[in-house]
Each structure stands twice: as C-alpha cells, then as structure tokens.
Amino acid sequence: MRFFFHFGRYLLLLKQLFKRPENYRMYWDELFRQMVAIGVSSLGIVIIISVFMGAVTTVQTAYQLISGLVAKTVIGAIVSDSSILELGPTITSLVLAGKIGSSIASEIGTMRVTEQIDALEIMGVNAPGYLISPKILAAVITIPMLIVLSITLSISGGIFVGDLTGILSAQQFIEGARSSFLPYNIFFSLTKAFTFAFIISSVSAYQGYYTSGGSLEVGQSSTKAVVYSCILILLSDYLLAQLML
C-alpha cells in the first residue's frame, strides 16, 4: 500500500510542475543555473569514468577473445557497441544518480526542513514549479549531452589503449566499430538517456520535497534518492531493452 501512496503523491507532484510560472525571468535564470550545476559540474567525473571504461573494456575483451580464429577487429565492434548500448548511458547515469540525485534531494530537503518552501507557498508561489521544474528540465537537457560525450570518450579510450598496448591498431578498431554500427543504436541510447535523466531528477526532487524532520532526515532522503534512482534506472533499462531491441 505504501508503494501506491508514494506513487500517487509522486504523480500529483509532477502535475504541479506544468502550472504557468509566476515569473518567467526567475524561471529561466534558475534553469540556466541548474544546467551549470547538473551538466558542467559533472564533466570531470564523466570524462574520467568514460575513458577508463572504454580502456578496461578493450583490455578485457582482448583477454577473452584473442585467438587465431577471431579477428582483432571484433574487439572494436564489441567495445563500440557496448559503449553505445549499455556502458555509456547506463553506467554514466548510475554515477550521475549518486552525484546529481543526492545534490537535488539534499538541496530541496534542506529548504523543506528550514521552512523555506512553506514561505514560498504562503507567498502564493508554485513551489514545485519554481524549485523542481527547472531541475528536471536542466537534467533532461544536459544529461543526454553528457552521455553522448561519455560514449565518444569511451570509444576513444578503447582506441587509445588498444593502440598503446599493441592489442590492435586504431585502424583495426575503427574498422570493427564501423562494421557493426547501426544508427538505431544511437536512437536507443538517447531514448535511455532522456528516460534516465527524468528518473534521476524527478525521483530525487520527490524525496527532497517531502522530507520532514531535521538534518538527519535530509541525509536519509538523499540516500533514498540515490538508491531508488539506481533501482529505477536498472529496471527501466531492462524494460526499454525488452521493448525496443
């Protein structure tokens, strides 16, 4: 029963996001601030994770597949397809759920326990529309961009390490990647990216918005936001793969 209670309250919260903003200038200012906080501030960790993700996948694939009967170009095909279909969108989103999700939940949760949200509501401001809507929109815009960057860097990391260690040349890697490339895989990956971005931002905002108590409860809401976001990302990952592949 608690699941249906929280799910219904989550839907009602999302409904409030579509009300007309009281001040468009403040809304857009907050949107751009959130795009910087969510997107630009996450560049470093995405770059590091993506490069090493592609490098490790290349080394491990070579360890498992290298033999006289398997062409080296197969490594490029496997690494590139894995980066596009799974490693880029899913692993990156799980990492961002920990960074962005906890930040959103703690920010909104702190405003709730310090009664700042109550003050906004007393003044007649649509608090969910002002606090949550820009965060969700900023996440939906910036996280897919980060995932595209992650896929590019993951493949680049695989090419660099493969060439550096002598596993396969850059030309062999690119030949294998081109032989297995399907444009539909990009569409599928972007669909996952937008879905995961919405899950991370909306679930984290919900956890923060309905925080009650003090600083201890804010920490608990941040933890729940990360855990629930990761679970829903993995569940939606399976469902999208089942439906679209």
Image: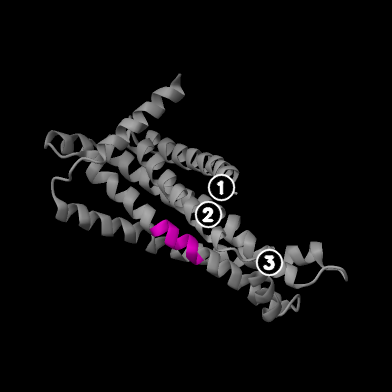
Q: Amino acid at mark 1?
A: Met
- Measured as percent of width and height from the top left, residue 76 is found at 69, 69
Q: Which residue is mark 2?
A: 188
Q: Secondary structure at mark 1?
A: helix
Q: Mark 3 Cα within 10 Å, few/some/many (few <14, many 20+)? A: many
Q: Which residues are magenta?
A: 142-149
Asked if 40 appears above or below 110 in the picture, the reply is below
Q: Amino acid at mark 2?
A: Phe
Q: Are marks 2 and 3 in contact (CB under 8 Å)?
A: no
Instruction: Point out the residue furthest to the top here.
Output: 1
Kindly identify which residue carries mark 3: 77
Q: CA distance from mark 2 to mark 3?
A: 17 Å
In the picture, measured across the screen, residue 99 lies left or right of residue 241, that is: left
Q: Is residue 63 visible?
A: yes
Which quadrant does the N terminus fall into? top left
**Residue depicted at 58% across the width and 46% down the height:** 241
